[in-house]
Image (cartoon, helix red, strand yellow):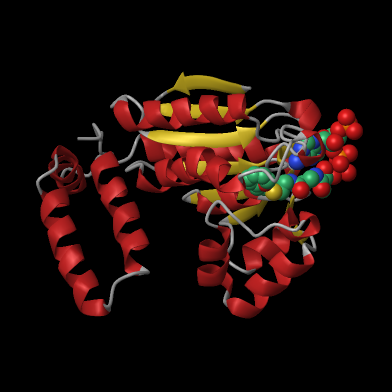
Amino acid sequence: TVLVSMEAGVLTLTLHRPDKLNAFNEEMHRALRAGFERAHEDTGVRAVLLTGAGRGFSAGQDLGDRDPRKADGPPDLGRTIEAFYNPLIRLVRSLEKPVVCAVNGVAAGAGANLAFACDITLAARSARFIQAFSKIGLVPDSGGTFTLNRLLGEQRAKALTMTAEPLDATTAAEWGLIWKVVDDEALMAEATALAARLAAGPTKGLGLTKRAIQAASANDLDAQLDLERDFQREAGSSADYAEGVAAFLEKRTPEFSGR
Ligand code: LHQ
């Protein structure tokens, strides 16, 4: 349900239930989680590329997986969130390595919010994002209320989630929900090149940069300035800082080790 491949420090995770538009069942959750856990533990992994197989990125929760019509009482969706979606979003956000997301087609429900939780998200021009939750009486999850509110403000966040109107990729980029739109046929080449470039980068510094930017939403300026001081101290003791400065002074391309 998830294809895993590793090349030049990039761990590529491809959601693979194409006949269901890569909707999440438990098996796919477990496989994706294992991929992100590997990214945390394996020092050889220096960037992650997340994408989907077939014509969709992900249609969110597989709605056939827990059909309420076949259940005895009301389902405990809180358990599903606690067991699967929340750990996944936490793994993506806490990974101190860049996570590039290539949205190859429709991203709905938790699939959309997973894409927005990644660090640098590119989308095919034909992709669209749907906050499908309200169509079935649910609330946005996978960090959607957090991400949409912070990136878009209340009006756009509420309109998108309450109407479930599809948002095209170009508007998503104009609104700052994703990094950029790429022609469909160029998406994977561009996303792969970006992930490879980041994987060849100063991983320690990039990881600290990610943490600093994420911390900024909860900090005031003074706290953030203190955090930048601490993180710069840490980055300054990395081998990659020494290499970066040496390469600059010697007018050559740096060879970062990720340490
Ligand atoms: C699907 C799905 C799908 C199963 C397409 N499930 N089969 C968390 C915790 C616990 C419970 C609930 O939810 C959550 C979080 C969530 O993510 S809630 C939101 C769940 N997702 C949705 O409500 C989206 C449902 N899908 C759609 O609205 C459409 O499929 C979209 C707009 C994504 C794509 O439309 P189309 O391009 O027209 O494709 P399609 O509808 O024909 O889908 C293709 C196939 O994929 C089809 O199967 P079939 O056997 O008829 O070819 C769909 O049934 C299947 N599929 N999404 N979520």
Q: Which picture quadrant has residue 104?
A: top right
Q: Is residue 97 left or right of residue 256?
A: right
Relative to 221, residue 132 above or below: above
Q: Residue at x 22, y 44 (%)?
A: 251
Q: Residue at x 66, y 43 (%)?
A: 75
The residue at the point 65 percent across, 34 percent down is: 24
Q: Is residue 111 visible?
A: no
> In the displayed structure, does residue 111 sit left or right of residue 63?
left
Q: Residue furthest front?
A: 72
Using residue 217 as the reference point, say whether residue 142 is left or right of it: right
- Can you tell which quarter of the image residue 103 is in? top right
Ligand 1 quarter of the rendering: top right
Q: Is residue 72 above or below residue 114?
A: above
Front position in the image: 214 or 244: 214
**Percent position (x, y) of residue 173?**
63, 62
Residue at coordinates 63% horizontally, 71% vertically from top-left? 157
Q: Quadrant of the N terminus?
A: top right
Q: Is residue 254 left or right of residue 155?
A: left
- Whole-percent x, y for residue 207 in the image: 30, 46
* Whole-percent x, y for residue 156 in the image: 66, 74
User: Up-down: is 22 above or below 97?
Assistant: above
Q: Residue 65: x and y, percent?
A: 72, 32
**Quarter placement of the C terminus:** top left
Residue 77 visible in rendering? yes
